[in-house]
Amino acid sequence: QQQVKQSPQSLIVQKGGISIINCAYENTAFDYFPWYQQFPGKGPALLIAIRPDVSEKKEGRFTISFNKSAKQFSLHIMDSQPGDSATYFCAAGGSYIPTFGRGTSLIVHP
Amino acid sequence: ETGVTQTPRHLVMGMTNKKSLKCEQHLGHNAMYWYKQSAKKPLELMFVYSLEERVENNSVPSRFSPECPNSSHLFLHLHTLQPEDSALYLCASSQDPHGLNTEAFFGQGTRLTVV
């Protein structure tokens, strides 16, 4: 049973565009929602995370939007750059061991 | 560097071989994890150790055998693997799997190929 559903599986964006990746979760006990970024040949690394007491968190060009009632959260990458090309994983955790989504392969064309 | 080191980075083994993957962290974390990453699949949690005791095992085949001799080291012993076990094996650590800070720090992984 997949507890965190992530979409799309792949995404192609032009440089300067907005990249949007969505995730939905099932377990209402989750209270920590991180996004990880993985480059080829590297392990995933934490990019940005949010807790359900806020609806939005922004760090530079990266923003998490969180909708508690819909049990959904999304990652927005503004002014996408070729260097952002990577695989992005959402996850959910807190009092539970983190559960990861399937990942989204993002390609940003120059 | 994330503070989590995995060796070897690449491993090719036959189906009758026995090998071990090693993971080391000096972040002072209490929990360590093994994940399997296959193409187009979610990260699959294999084992979790918290304070050196195994707390979760998601019914992983017995040909994978973990060992956690102390809070800084984690091993994954492999024997009689199948070609479908070829994948990237990631080690991770976190401060506490059931606490408020559950950020996972990942190693670079071991790319395993079973021939």
Image (cartoon, coloured by chain):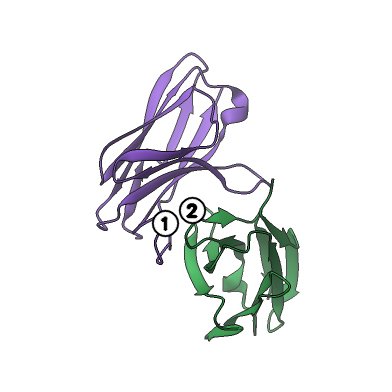
- Spot occupied by residue B48 in the image (x, y as percentages of width and height): 42, 43
Residue B25 drawn at (x, y percent): 29, 51
Within 10 Å of disc 1 (Cα), the crowding (few <14, some 14-19, many 20+) is some
Q: Is residue A66 left or right of B77 when viewed as pictured? A: right
Q: Is A10 in front, or is B34?
A: B34
Circle 2 packing at 10 Å, graded few (<14), some (14-19), many (20+), is many
Element at label 1? loop
Disc 1 from disc 2: Cα separation: 7 Å
Looking at the picture, how far across and down is residue B8, in whole percent?
37, 38
Q: Colour of chain B?
A: purple
Q: Position of residue B4 (x, y in %)?
A: 34, 53
Above-or-below relation of B22 to B62: below
Report which residue position mark 2 lands on. Answer: A97
**How many numbered marks, from 0 up?**
2
Q: Residue at x 52, y 75 (%)?
A: A51
Q: In the rendered image, is residue A61 in sight?
A: no
Q: Which chain is green?
A: A
Q: Is mark 2 on a helix, strand or loop?
A: loop
* Residue B37 falls in image quadrant: top right
